[in-house]
Image: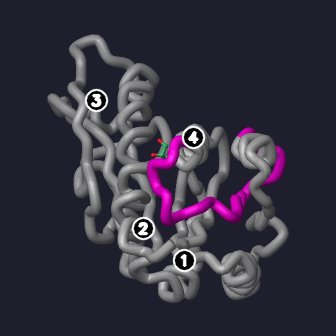
Amino acid sequence: MVNVAVLVSGGGTNLQALIDAEHAGLFPNARIVLVLSSRAGVKALERAEEAGIPTTVIAKDDYPEDEARADAILAALEGAGAGLVVLAGYMSILPVRVCRAYAGRLINIHPALLPRHGGVGYYGLRVHKAVLEAGDAESGATVHFVDDRGVDSGEIIAQARVPVLPDDTPEALQARVLEVEHRIFPEAVARLTAKATQ
Ligand code: GRF
């Protein structure tokens, strides 16, 4: 059984998709054991509590030093016995030490077709605005490993495409992309944990 820790910062619709997928039996070899948020009071924490999943908040304000924040995050992940760490709308940059400790077991979802529209500063609606400004005919979502070399730079695990429509707004495109995020993210967790023994 793989213990999964999900890192969040906001609404948590991807977290909800993962919870629902676990309940539906999509990844029988994995269970979500911890939800770690970079912000207190967010909806994602409510979703975790409703599902009976332990939560913790490790905010940058409380741990301004990277090293202390890394220690706190690593202690939480180790305490949960995490075998897979899933960034699901985690809006903080993970300290390099955490990336290294979980190399190959740390994944993220990005709301565009990487390597397009990724990297520092490409998050939330900014990504969808960039897609529209570039005049791209399609966008989508990417699940990828997180490495310690850069932001959104790790090996791609899965992608799904959606069309960009002529009168799209960033919000409309975001909603279309989120739908496919909610499908490919649980599928990726299923695939990555399929070989684990029960
Ligand atoms: C998603 O678009 C995800 O790709 C990005 O942040 C957003 C988080 O949404 N990294 P939610 O918190 O899962 O609803």
**Position of 80 relative to 152 (above/below):** below
SS for callout 2? helix
Q: Which of the labelled discs sits on residue 193, or is there none?
A: 2
Q: Position of residue 154 (x, y in %)?
A: 32, 71
* Amino acid on which disc 1 is placed: Gly
Q: Horizontally, is 56 left or right of 67 in the view?
A: right
- Residue at coordinates 63% horizontally, 60% vertically from top-left? 32
Which badge, 3 or 1, is on the more N-terminal residue? Answer: 1
Which badge, 2 or 1, is on the more N-terminal residue? Answer: 1
Q: Which of the labelled discs sits on residue 20, or is there none?
A: 4
Question: What segment carries the magenta color?
Answer: 24-43
- Residue at coordinates 28% horizontally, 36% vertically from top-left? 131
Count neighbours of disc 4 (C-alpha within 10 A) and say few if under 14, some if 14 to 19, many if 20 or more.
Answer: some
Q: State the separation of the CA atoms marked 2 and 1.
A: 9 Å
Residue indicated by mark 1: 83
- Residue at coordinates 79% horizontally, 50% vertically from top-left? 52
**Position of 65 relative to 20 (above/below):** below
* Amino acid on which disc 2 is placed: Thr
Q: State the separation of the CA atoms marked 2 and 3.
A: 35 Å
Q: Which of the labelled discs sits on residue 132, or is there none?
A: 3
Q: State the separation of the CA atoms marked 3 and 1.
A: 37 Å
Which badge, 4 or 3, is on the more N-terminal residue? Answer: 4
Q: State the separation of the CA atoms marked 4 and 3.
A: 31 Å
* Amino acid on which disc 3 is placed: Leu
Q: Observer-nearest residue: 144 or 32? A: 32
Q: State the separation of the CA atoms marked 4 and 2.
A: 17 Å
